[in-house]
Each structure stands twice: as C-alpha cells, then as structure tokens.
Image: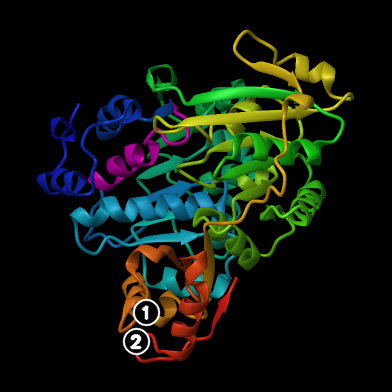
Amino acid sequence: MKFSTLALSDEMVSNLDKIGYEKMTPVQAETLPLILEGKDVIAQAKTGSGKTAAFGIGLLSKLQVKKFRVQALVLCPTRELADQVAKELRVIAKFAHNIKILTLCGGAAFGPQLGSLRHGAHIIVGTPGRILKHLNKETLSLENLETLVLDEADRMLDMGFIEEIDKVLEYAPKTRQTLLFSATYTNEITFISNRIQNDAVSVKTVSTEVKNSIQERFYETKNKVDSLIKIFSTFKPENIIVFTNMKVVAKEIAEKLAQNKIDALAIHGDLEQYERNDVLVQFANKSCPVLIATDVAARGLDIKELSMVVNYDLPHTEETYTHRIGRTGRAGAEGIAITLYDEYEIENAMEYKDEFRIFEGSEALKKQNNFEMKPQNVTLVIEGGKKDKLRAGDLLGALTGENGLKGSSIGKIDIYDRQAYVAIQREFIDEAHKKLSNGRIKNKKFSVWVL
C-alpha cells in the first residue's frame, strides 16, 4: 500500500518518496489511517518494523508550523533511542520549512538544553526523567500539546519509568491524542493504556511482519569465555552483541577477550555519557566487532546488520530472550542467536527446548589456531562538532582533499555537539590521522586522536 493513498499533503508524499519510503510496512498501513483520524492507538510492533515513521508521519502531518509551541512529545526509554527517533523525524520533516525538533535527555548538560528551549520547539523527543525535570523547573510547557507518544512503552515500564510518566502526564492537557507503541503486549501495558488513553484502538502487526530469520543454538559449557571464543572461531560472525545480566561481568568478558586477541568493548550503567558515545560509535561504525552489554545499556542501540547475538547468561525471562535475539536476522539477512549455560543453569535452559532450537555440548565448537578478531575500521576523534558548525562534508573534504584518502576508505561519520567521529579503514588510519592533525578543517585547527 502506497503513502499516496493516505490523507497526506502532496509535499509530505513527495518527501517520503525522495527519502525512499515507497510502500507502507504492516504497522504503518494499520496505524496511520487511525492516527490521521486523530484516534488513540496502542500498537504492538517490534523494533525495525517502521513504527517511528508511523507515529512520525502522523504527528508531523497535523503540525501547525506557524504555531511555535510544543505540539508533540515523544517519550523514549533511552538517550540512544531518543536520538535515533529525533534523527528519523527530522528526515521526514523535510517536507516543510522551519520545523524544530529538540531532544531532551539525561546524561547531557542541562544548561544548553535551557538555551535551546528558550528558542522554542514544535516537537520534543526525550527520556521521562529529563522531561520531568524541565517541567518541574517550568522551562518546558506542554499546555499546547496535541500528541503524546510512548515509544517502546514496555521498556520504559521495565526500567521503572512509570512514576515519571504519570507525573509528566499531569502537565499534559487531558484532551490530546496518545499513541502507545510496544514490542510486547503484557497486562501491564493494557492497564497503562486504559489509564492514559481514550478509547484506544488496538493494533497487532507482529504476526503479519516478516519474521527475523534466526538460527537458535544452545551450548552447555564448563568455561563460558573459552566457549565464546570457540563460537567466534566456528561461525566467524562480523559483529556480535554478547548479553550478560551483570555489568561487572561485562567488563570481565571484554578484558578476557582482549587478552585472547579479540577486540571487544563493554557497555554498562557505570559509563559516563562520553564513554558510552565512544563505545557505541565504535561498534556501529565497525571499529570494534564485539560489544558486551547488559540489557539496560543496550536498549535503544540500533544496529541494522548484526550477524550474531550471544546470551552469555540465560535471560531472566523469555520476553528478554525474544528482545535480545530479535536484534539479529533483520531485513531478510540470516542471523545466529547462541545461548550459553552451565551446570547451574541446566534446568532453566531446558525450558527453551523445542523442535526448532539446536542444543549441543560445547565440544561441538572448534577453535582454529592463531584465531583473532580485528576490526575493519579504526575511529578518529575530532575535538569539534555541531557547535563548531562542523558537517560530515567538511570532514570528508579535509580527508580526501589534495593527495588525500579515497572516499571508499572512509566509513561512518558521527557528529555530536562537541566531538566528531570518523571511521577509517584500518590500513589508512595513520595517513588519515596525519592529514587531519597537520591540516585544517574549515580553516581551523582541531585536536585529533585515534580512539
């Protein structure tokens, strides 16, 4: 079904066509007509189903650009997801001029957010805690709010945000459109919907979506780190997220893998925001093949092509297991999900046994001699970003200019407020570092280092 069949402006349809939104995904086809009618919607849709565009197109289509007030609020469980949602909304919003979308998340300095809010915004995307802080300090007003979106509502409940959400709602008008998107459909989600929505229409598209193609394997082992290395050696995945239940274990695994010549980084709740950025950027731009993560730390992390997921620890619930493994095998690609369990976890592991999942002993895994995992890229950090008016084109120009690198040796570019990250093919990293260190970007010298 095409977007042109909906009650959207010609400008919106034309922009959707330009950015490659050719046909609606199941969740978009089911929810958009309802959202455009102004109805409250509770939708079950997994990550990668196109749900951001579903609510994004809906709220942007009724936005009054000349009315420079906050008309829509999107609540997300994590900073990473909020950034991702805001980025997609900005692309969709190109159909009209001067639509301002602002992210307000914890972990970022409060002062700059105050400055941005003083200049006004049409749409706010953020985490419940930071949104509430601005509401309490009266630096944010929701009196003109028309659309409220709860994205990944089940995750927000898991993370204990229900009180903050309730308090945020006290500042919102009673008459509004409320859209709730969740990957799972628990009793708690239904209860929340009944409390905050008005005659919400329920949409479940999970069964009509193309299922992720995932091979699920379980290995009993006496030494999990040793088995982990053998898994990498046996299957040779390009990039892997290894899930653990405890942050202290995440650090230990990363250290042990590094000792075995496997490049790995850990992400967990103890990291400062800049450290989180460093880790996530390196994993996303292929400067590190293995990410060790706790469930909370990995939420909102969107890697479109992930070869493998490993459960180093058995998840506490089958719901968590589904969330974890659903990150691989997307968009028609084959994915592998592997779960390790030891003698103390046998009973819980057996609950996962069915006719499709493969259960084997760790002796089925082999480690090749001199096995190691090195990244495809290395990341350069430039001490300058959006605040310095740096754009991706400026960095590309500085690297590929006279006697510079080929464009093909430069990977993903991420630009934050104060820093920029550029992925460079490993064999060209010294050349790239020298070129940026000795040269100028926009006629200005910036500090540059290898991450």
What quarter of the picture does the N terminus occupy? top left
Q: Residue at x 39, y 22 (%)?
A: 209
Q: x, y (%) of residue 229?
A: 73, 41
Q: Which residues are magenta?
A: 44-62
The residue singled out by tag 1 in the image is 389
Q: Is residue 35 left or right of residue 78?
A: left
Q: x, y (%) of residue 402?
A: 30, 84
Mark 2: which secondary structure?
loop
Q: x, y (%) of residue 183?
A: 51, 29
Mark 1: which secondary structure?
loop
Query: What amino acid is labelled 1 in the image?
Result: Lys
Q: Residue at x 45, y 76 (%)?
A: 385
Q: Is residue 363 left or right of residue 383?
A: right
The residue singled out by tag 2 in the image is 442
Q: Which mark is residue 209?
A: none
Q: Tell me, yes or no, whether the two marked residues, 2 and 1, touch with CB atoms within 8 Å.
A: yes
Quick check: 288 above or below 351? below
